[in-house]
Image (cartoon, helix red, strand yellow):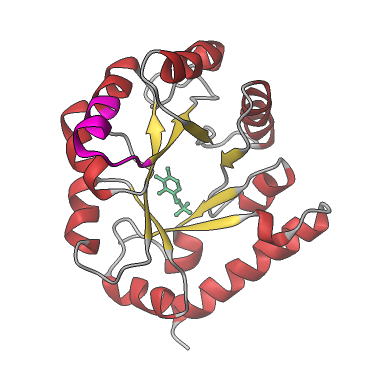
Amino acid sequence: MTASAQAYADVVARIARAAQACGRDPASVALTAVSKEQPWEAVEPVLAAGQRVFGENRVQDAMARWKGRAGGLELRLIGPLQSNKASEAVAFFDVIETLDRQKLARALSEEMARQGRSPRIYVQVNTGEEPQKAGVAPAEADAFIAACRRDFGLTVEGLMCIPPLGEPPGPHFARLAKIAARNGLSELSMGMSGDFETAIAFGATRVRVGSAVFGERP
Ligand SMILES: *Cc1c(COP(=O)(O)O)cnc(C)c1O
């Protein structure tokens, strides 16, 4: 078994154990394997082992890597999206996890109507209110989700967050879960290589794991 196939099996097992440890069904937590910036030699064994859901943070890179590959994959955009790339993102991705502003909501909504294609949408929340980080401010999340639904006709499927580096992530996961609950959203994309077990304890329905599966990014 290659290193990444072994690491993949370990992460899948850790997800199941973390779910069981808090009385959750392991099937209620999905893995997004974050293949961004990884060499194909690391990605291929994980694909061969049956993983079908991959996360990428840049539209161009994702298209270069995945265009024309086998069907049956689910590709998720987990990095910031510029409005002028909305057309490509709508055409290419199955899920866009990083909606965080009105201009982008409008661009996505227009592209979906134009293309007749509807990637599923997550709103990114900047739970740590970090100025350099993408995501809607927690205090504005309810109004933004409402505007996405009412003004742009978007079906928001869930929320996504990236807690600040160097802070305990638990309170941020709890915050995201609370915002989701009061907005009737059941999907929570939270938890990365360093904290996915914590995220599962706080209700993550999908974890985004890169380096723990594929190794450190070059
Ligand atoms: C890179 C990235 C990940 C994966 O990070 P790892 O620490 O390698 O697991 C998850 N989510 C987002 C948004 C990322 O950009």
Left or right, residue 9 beside residue 44: right
Please indicate, yes or no, whether residue 160 appears anywhere in the rendered image. no
Quadrant occupied by the C terminus? bottom left
Left or right, residue 137 beside residue 69: right
Which quarter of the picture shows residue 36? Answer: bottom left
Residue depicted at x 42% and y 67%: 214
> Can residue 109 be found in the magenta stretch?
yes
Q: Position of residue 1 (x, y in %)?
A: 48, 89
Q: Which residues are magenta?
A: 108-119
Q: Main secondary structure of the magenta part?
A: helix
Q: Position of residue 133 (x, y in %)?
A: 40, 27
Q: Nearer the viewer, residue 97 or 148?
A: 148
Residue depicted at x 67% and y 65%: 14
Residue depicted at x 18% and y 36%: 87
Q: Position of residue 39 (x, y in %)?
A: 28, 69
Which quarter of the picture shows residue 13? Answer: bottom right
Please indicate, yes or no, whether residue 38 appears anywhere in the rendered image. yes
Residue depicted at x 57% and y 46%: 191
Residue 113 in the image: above or below residue 137: below
> Can residue 67 be found in the magenta stretch?
no
Number of numbered tags placed on the structure image = 0
Q: Position of residue 24 (x, y in %)?
A: 78, 53
